[in-house]
Image: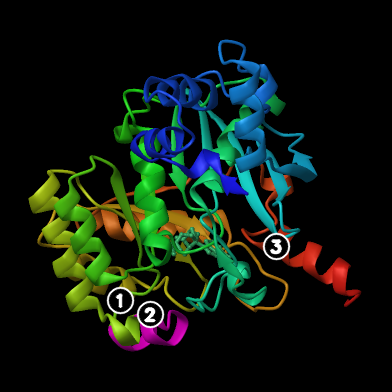
Amino acid sequence: MKDILSMTLPELQEAVQALHEPKFRAAQIYHWLHVRKVTDFAQMTDLSSSLRTKLQDEFCIKRLFIARKLASSMDDTVKYLYRLPDGQHVETVLMHYQHGWRLCISTQVGCKMGCQFCASTIAGYVRNLEVSEMLLQIDETERDAGISISGLVLMGIGEPLDNFENVLRFLEMLSDPKGRTMSLRHVTLSTCGIVPKIRELAERKTGLTLAVSLHQPDNQSRSQVMPVNRRYPLPELMEACQYYFAMTGRRVTYEYAIMEGENDSFEDARKLAGLLSHQQAHVNLIPVNAVKERNFHADRQAAQRFMQYLEKLGIHATVRRTLGSDIEAACGQLRHEADLAETGEE
Ligand code: SAH
């Protein structure tokens, strides 16, 4: 059965015409799905019952199920482990900010990128998420929490630019004036640095904010922790970032996870400042989340010390507010645990 939530309005129009129905029915259905967000064809009360039956025979409206939900006792952060229709799992994190609710969604089941410090990689890559599965992380969370989100980050499990086609369609549907109408100015996409896709994204001028995960300030050490750097080394990556800024007028944000003794010396700060000297960069410092299988660690003070180094060198940096630190199983960890529980491993 066709996944109707992944279909754009023009695709739906074609499908409706193939069912010998007038084209305008598609707009009604699209409105029910993406504005009213119904979960059942029976709820589409302005369609004839014969059309509703036809739709039911041809299409399904997917759902995600909450496999686990961890609410922070320190702030309003909630972490969801969602079960997908095929039994796979992804994580979604809801955070409260001054200006409203922000959601961090996953784009793949697992990840191929192999970053050493990341739990999403340890649990392995399975598949890309469908457009509907990205949209549903928003819908199911909004339904469960009784809120509506005002910001979105593609920073959960997976590499969004490795699921490029679906992510672009997702963004298109998210911002569709006939549907969900979310401004992409409120969306941030985080990448480990797939250079050709950064350039393509720049050319599409979507208006979203690009965040790039750097984590090491020179080629040799970055290649050791982030294999993607061997394919797309730092000079090429920095050029692509400058191209993104030139094309879109949007400043690129850089993510730098502090790992004590690995990337937090003054010399590292100096190299990083050199790398970013050609642009008005903003660096987000995150004390690395300890992942059980890995040895990296850092505390907030280490991140603050590094921030001061950077400020001295004229680079604007912030230490990311740690929300929900009591449930801060590093990204991908919940999915990893769910897999282990299913296979009975320890
Ligand atoms: N694949 C994308 C987006 C998902 S990861 C990317 O690489 O940007 C989201 C962010 O979390 C990235 O900056 C990633 O490097 C970072 N991250 C992964 N594991 C981490 C850990 N253990 N501690 C802190 N940050 C981590």
Secondary structure at badge 2 equals helix
Tell me the magenta residue range: 219-228
Please indicate, yes or no, whether residue 38 appears anywhere in the rendered image. Answer: no
What residue sits right under mark 3 in the picture? 333
Q: Is residue 223 magenta?
A: yes
Q: CA distance from mark 2 to mark 3?
A: 21 Å
Label 1 CB-ligand 1 distance < 8 A? no
Mark whose residue sits in front, 1 or 2: 2
Label 3 CB-ligand 1 distance < 8 A? no
Residue 64 disc label: none
Question: Depth check: 30 or 184 in front?
Answer: 30
In the image, residue 228 sits, relative to residue 197, either above or below, namely: below
* Three-letter code, disc 3: Gln
Spot the residue most to the top: 46
* Three-letter code, disc 2: Val
Question: Depth check: 184 or 214 in front?
Answer: 184
Residue that appears at 28% across and 42% down? 208
Callouts 1 and 3 close, C-beta under 8 Å = no
In the image, residue 321 sits, relative to residue 339, either above or below, namely: above
Residue that appears at 49% across and 35% down? 19
Whole-percent x and y of residue 91? 65, 51
Residue 267 disc label: 1
Whole-percent x and y of residue 129? 54, 57
Q: Is residue 268 left or right of residue 94?
A: left
* Three-letter code, disc 1: Glu
